[in-house]
Image (cartoon, helix red, strand yellow):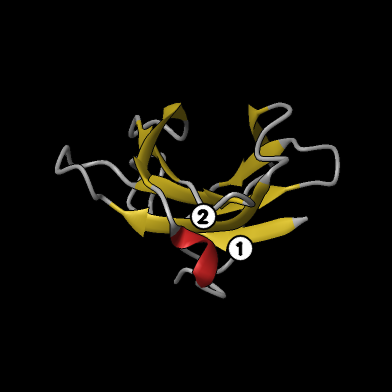
Amino acid sequence: TRIVGAADLDGDGYGDVLARDKAGTLYRYSGTGTGLLKDRVKVFSNWGGSYNAVVGVGDINSDGKSDLVERDTAGNLYRNNGDGKGSFGARVKIATGWQGYKGIF
């Protein structure tokens, strides 16, 4: 199970949170601006079973939407481009050799 603070993913101006359960389902909890979160919305099923680090990094591809970066157990780094509506596109490998780092922040 992982929980990631991931910026504004759905374009409403409030910070959102992502959580992955033991079954590998990734959920988004949209922020409300009051310190509370809305009910969860499923983003992906069977997602990230080999990931040992997931980071909400903001916009790293300059399209104005918040993205995710993940590292798998082999040290490969992936990016999922945010769609600005609370979901993400397919993963894209962006680097290798990251297994030597204890964490990604």
Which residue is painted at 39% across and 30% down in the image?
A: 85
Residue bearing the label numbered 2: 31
Q: Quadrant of residue 63?
A: top left
Rendered location of residue 45, percent (x, y): 71, 26
Q: Mark 2 near mark 1, Cβ–Cβ under 8 Å?
A: yes
Q: Which amino acid type corresponds to the residue marked 1 in the rendered image?
A: Leu
Rendered location of residue 28, percent (x, y): 59, 43
Q: Residue furthest bottom?
A: 102
Front-lying residue, 9 or 12: 9
Say if 89 sits above or below 38 in the image. Answer: above
Q: Which amino acid type corresponds to the residue marked 2 in the rendered image?
A: Gly
Q: Which mark is residue 36?
A: 1
Which residue is painted at 41% across and 39% down in the image?
A: 10
Which residue is painted at 63% across and 28% down in the image?
A: 44
Q: Residues within 10 Å of mark 1 (few under 14, many from 20)?
A: few
Which residue is painted at 55% across and 69% down in the image?
A: 35
- Quadrant where the N terminus lies? bottom right
Residue 6 visible to an observer of this rendering: no
Rendered location of residue 95, percent (x, y): 35, 47
Say if 86 sits above or below 50 in the image. Answer: above
Q: Which mark is residue 73?
A: none
